Amino acid sequence: MHSLSFPGAYGVLLRVILGVIVAHAPQWAAAQSRPADTFPIRQQPIDYFSDATRNPLAELDARLATGVVRLTYAEGSPLGYLPSLLDALDIPVESQVLTFSAAARNAQLVTAKQPRAVYFNDDVYVGYVPGSPELELATFDADKGIVFFTLRQLASDSPRLDRDENCTQCHVHVRNTAGVPGLVLGTMLVEPPAKRSELVPLTLSQPWSERFGTWYLTGRFGGQRHRGNSLGLPPEAAPGVTEGSPVPENQFTTGQLAARFDVTRYPSPHSDGVALLVLAHQVAVQNLTTRLLYEQAFRRETQATEERLARELLFADEQPLVGEWTGSSAFAQRYATPREKCPVPNLRELDLHTRLYRWPLSPQFDARPLQALPTDLRARLVRRLQLGLEGRDESLTLPHPEPDRRAARAILGTVP
């Protein structure tokens, strides 16, 4: 073998370049292995783990610190602070949905006989498992996107919310959270012999036959066959239903739910099917909103995410309902009640016959997360929505009739 040598200044320059390459090889290798769809969340301008103050949970914690709000602990009950916390956050107990997926915090406590409960309003989420040492909370922060907190389930004279810094271990995923800190709402499929497949996002565009794996849902479900209520349960808990098969009935009652586990350990005997559909849509919108916020902050291209978000807000890919859906609780009625300064038409109005919502524009358009987007970003998104509702975007085909689209366009016309 012959070695190469470079005389004079060239040799010095080459040795310097090689030294730089060797010294920085680990960092460059790490950068190459990092998924292109994720972000350096610890860096400015996001600085994810610094104080997050522009969100409802930080505001509640400030009121707890000053004594303006006090939480009551339910002694002798597994609920602990849960009822008082839901009341303080104006989260309806009717929003309760139940999952027995092991892909959760405190997974060792979550089973088909002790599911994890999720409660939500427009932009705050609370997770509860009987026997867990803490309640899990999440919300949208105007600077950092989705952020996470916990509340210890121990009676205290001065309970406080704690920022959860371990959340990103599970809540940053290219597919399940759009590559940013986000909410994980998934469906699990079971393949014989009882092997769980990879978690996949639960969305309105997903085939019905793949939805609701490891979820309970109560109500009447039209003509849809899905994987809820039976997946992962032993045969004796669901006679005539094999693991991994869709539920043969088009309804599931609270009585059937109570036969599966002790519902008195939860504030509601329901796992409302309509609430779960609303939650799936809302989570998809807010994860994409967080991604858009990060792309803008880190000066990345936003066009693809703007398009994805616009499609979600216009229900462009929603799988149609077949037959009427009704939840088992009063969630649908409470959710659709017009709010103060509610736009006309009321975007929260539900259809539940052929689609989830009555109007071709999501109520999330008017919710706090999208309102928090930078002005230029929101203006571009409004323009995309306008083109879609006018039928001038060839990539969008909306099933809604023209009068409905015209009513939705009127709402967009009021946006400053």
Image (spheres, grey):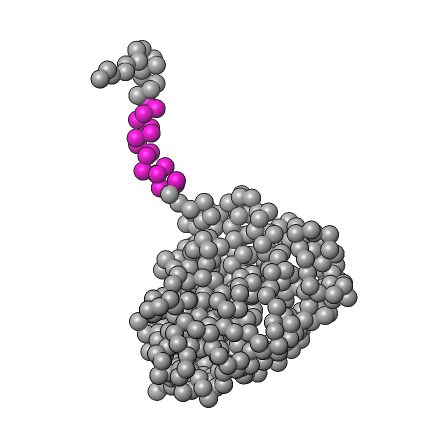
Residue 174 position in % (x across, y down): 45, 53
Q: Where residue 232 sits in the image (x, y, percent)?
A: 37, 74
In the rendered image, residue 26 lying in the magenta stretch gets the answer yes
Give the magenta range.
16-32
Q: Is residue 303 visible?
A: yes
Q: Residue at x 52, y 53 (%)?
A: 291
Q: Nearer the viewer, residue 32 or 203?
A: 203
Q: Tell me what residue is drawn at x 56 percent, y 70 percent.
A: 278
In the rendered image, which quarter is residue 257 located in?
Answer: bottom left
At which x and y percent is residue 267? 45, 83
Which residue is rendered at x = 35% and y = 68% of the image? Answer: 192
Looking at the image, is 389 positioned above or below residue 337? Answer: above
Residue at the left extreme, as displayed:
1
Seen from the viewer's position, the closer of residues 45 and 318 is 318
**Residue 172 placed where, x, y %?**
42, 56
**In the rendered image, the vertical position of residue 305 relative to residue 166, given as above or below:** above
Q: Quadrant of residue 204?
A: bottom right
Q: Is residue 62 magenta?
A: no
Which residue in the rendered view is the most extreme toward the top?
A: 8
Report the number of numbered marks: 0
Identify the residue shown where x is 45% and y is 45%: 36
Indicate the quadrant where residue 240 lies: bottom left
Which quadrant is home to the N terminus?
top left
Query: Does the rendering let one see residue 73?
Result: no
Image vertical order of residue 177 relative to residue 328, above or below = above
Magenta: main secondary structure equals helix
Q: 7 and 206: which one is in front?
A: 206
Pick the front one: 141 or 291: 291
Q: Quadrant of the C terminus?
A: bottom right
